[in-house]
Image: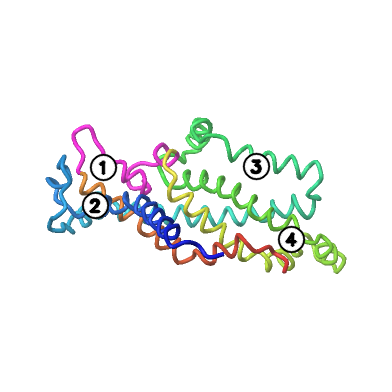
Amino acid sequence: MKRRPAAVAVRSIVVYIFVLWCIAPIIWLVSTSLKSDVDAFSPTPVWFFIPQFENYVNAWVDGGMGQSMLISTAVGCASAILGITAGLPLAYLTTQIWPPESTGSSRATLAILLLTIVPPVLSLTPFYRALFGVGLTGNAFGLTIIHTFYAILLAVLIFRSFLVNFPREIREAALIDGLGEWRALLSTILPNVWGAMAATFVLALIQSWNEFLYALVLTNGDSQTVPVTIAGFLSFFGTNWARLTAAGVIGALPIVIFAIVVRKHMARGLSFGGVK
């Protein structure tokens, strides 16, 4: 049955309005970052202005965005890699060594789910006291440990969704051939979860890049990440909105580009199982 032109037109208009509503904050962010301080702080919208690209230079150099980008990249990549490295064996344990329907596997999965829903503000004090006791506050190492912890939880849940339907007979055959558990994991499981590993890396990196609370408390000075550095542009003495929005664009642009580049791999990794 063909749709009426009027219904198609109305649907198209609704879609365009929704898209415009979604991208309006982005347009505002970019346009404000190119305005002068006077135009950015003006109570009435300024539609025509001369672009001030020095706002990006000031945010990068004077605002410390360059240093914070390096810290965020290092912490995000390290925590994602460590999370995958630890999460895959744990998922293997709860799906292959332990049957997925067993009591141990069910309790482990429930514990992981409960840990993921605990508000960070509740676990902030215990984590801070533990890291403070070993001298890992005020630098990026303690933050990497916390982000790795959450990356492990994410990795276990993603890998478990793949391995829960993976034939356990393949592992048993590998053990009969004389392979140990680690070699069975590397030879039978690892080649089938590359897509899940790529998806987990992307999601863990984005999770680490956007995290603010732990980064605010556990880092200072040159070890601050992008969200904390951007928040530092706000002060009681006034806010330079042009430089603040420029820092926001700088902080968001790399992760947006990265997500666009790997979107197909991430979608394929999340939608396809390990066994064809």
Q: Over which residues does the magenta segment extend? A: 214-240
| Residue 115: percent from left, percent from top | 61, 38
Q: In which quarter of the image is residue 187?
A: bottom right
Q: Name the residue at 49% across, 30% down.
A: 125
- Give the residue pinned by disc 2: 59
Decide which of 254, 220 is in the foreground and name it: 254
Decide which of 43, 264 is in the foreground and name it: 43
Q: How many marks?
A: 4
Q: Which mark is residue 77?
A: none
Relative to residue 147, is residue 176 drawn left or right? Answer: right
| Residue 185: percent from left, percent from top | 73, 62
Amino acid type, label 2: Ala
Tell me if residue 143 is in the magenta stretch. Answer: no
Sequence order check, earlier mark of 2 and 3: 2
Q: Name the residue at 28% across, 50% down.
A: 29
Sequence order check, earlier mark of 4 and 1: 4
User: How far is disc 2 from disc 3 in space, using C-alphas?
Assistant: 39 Å
Numbered disc in front, either 3 or 4:
3
- Give the residue pinned by disc 4: 182
User: How far is disc 2 from disc 4 in space, using C-alphas?
Assistant: 48 Å
- Give the residue pinned by disc 3: 112
Relative to residue 105, is residue 237 drawn left or right? Answer: left
- Give the residue pinned by disc 1: 233
- Indicate the secondary structure of the residue bearing disc 4: helix
Amino acid type, label 4: Trp
